[in-house]
Amino acid sequence: MKKVRKAVIPAAGLGTRVLPATKAMPKEMLPIVDKPAIQYIVEEAAASGIEDILIITNRGKGLLEDHFDRAPELEERLTGNPEKEAILGQVVGISRLANIYYVRQKETRGLGHAVNCARSFVQGEPFAVLYGDDVILGEDPACGQLIRAYEAFGLGVVGVKEVTPEAIVKYSSLKVEPLQDNYFRCTDMVEKPAPGQAFSLYSILGRCVLPPEIFDILDRTPPGAGGEIQLTDAMRALARRDGMTAVDFTGTRYDMGSKLGIMQASVEVALDHPEIGGAFRAYLRELAGKL
Ligand code: UTP
C-alpha cells in the first residue's frame, strides 16, 4: 500500500459567515491569539508525517504564500536582539514546515470542486484533506490518526464526531457500525440531512484520507446541497462501493468558519498561552464576576 505523503488544504471558500472580516482576507488566515488558523493546520499535517501540501486558494493567495515564505527584512530586524530570538526561530520555522504548493480554484463551486483541483498534484497517491477552517488541537494529531486507520484497513477514512440533533442538519450524517475502539465502518452518508433523514449523529468534521479514485468520482458528481459540488456526495459513492473507515478522533475541533468557533478557539488557546495565559485567566475571572 502506498504511504500517505501528501495533503490538500482547501482554503478557497468565500467565508460568508464571518463577513466582513473575510471580505479581502481568507478565513483561514484569521488568528487564534497569535497564529493564523492555517498554520495550526499545516503544523498538524507536518506532525502527521506529511511532506507535500497543496493549498487551494482564491483571494488572499499572496497573503498565504507570504506567511509560509521567508521574510528577510523582518528576520534581519529580529536578528541579534536577545529578546526577539525565540520569535525569530518561530518566524523562520514557519517556512520550513513542509513543501507547500498553491493552486487557485477558479470558481467557488464547493468543497468537492476545490478538492478536484488537486488531481495533478496528487498523482495517483492516497492523500489527506484538511479543511482549512477546521482547527483541531490535541496531543495526537488528528490527521495522523486518520492516516493510521488508512494504513490499517486500506480504505478511505473520514474523521468524525457526534454532534447534536440540532447541528446535524448543517453537517453530514454517516451510516456507521462499530469496528473496534474509536473505529467504525461507514457504508453510506448524506450531506445536510433534512430533519428525520439522518443516519446517525456522527458527522465528518474537517479531515479525511482519500484514495486517488475519488477524482473520477468527483468528475461525475453533480452539484448537491446549496448548488455546490459536495465532497460528501463523492465520498458517499466511495462508501457505498468500497466502504470507508470512520475515526472518532481525539482532540478538540474549532470551527474557524463561524463567529462562535473563532471566539471559543481564541479563549481556550489564550487560557493556556505561555505568555498571556495567567493574565488572561485573571481577566476572565474578573469579567465573569460582572456577568
Ligand atoms: P465551507 O462551506 O465551510 O466554506 O467549506 P465557505 O463556503 O467559505 O462557508 P460560508 O460561506 O461561510 O458558509 C469548508 C472548507 O472548504 C473550503 C473553505 O475554504 C473551507 O476551508 N472551500 C469551500 C473551498 O476551498 N472552495 C469552495 O468552493 C468551498
Image: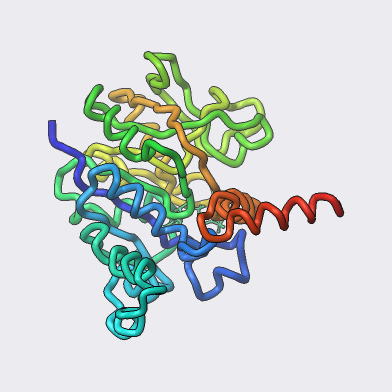
User: Residue 23 in the image: x percent, y percent?
Assistant: 55, 73
Rendered image coloring scheme: rainbow
User: Residue 156 in the image: x percent, y percent?
Assistant: 29, 31
User: Residue 71 in the image: x percent, y percent?
Assistant: 30, 78
Q: Residue at x 39, y 21 (%)?
A: 183
Depicted 83 relative to depicted 281: above or below: below
Depicted 83 relative to depicted 162: above or below: below
Quadrant of the drawing holding the N terminus: top left
Front residue of 267 and 115: 267
Furthest-right residue in view? 290
| Residue 65 seen from this side | yes
Report whether 138 appears left or right of 157: right
Q: Residue at x 46, y 29 (%)?
A: 189
Residue 17's image quarter? Answer: bottom right
Report whether 244 appears left or right of 23: left
Q: Residue at x 65, y 52 (%)?
A: 260
Q: Residue at x 60, y 51 (%)?
A: 271
User: Residue 64 in the image: x percent, y percent?
Assistant: 37, 69
Depicted 21 relative to depicted 111: above or below: below
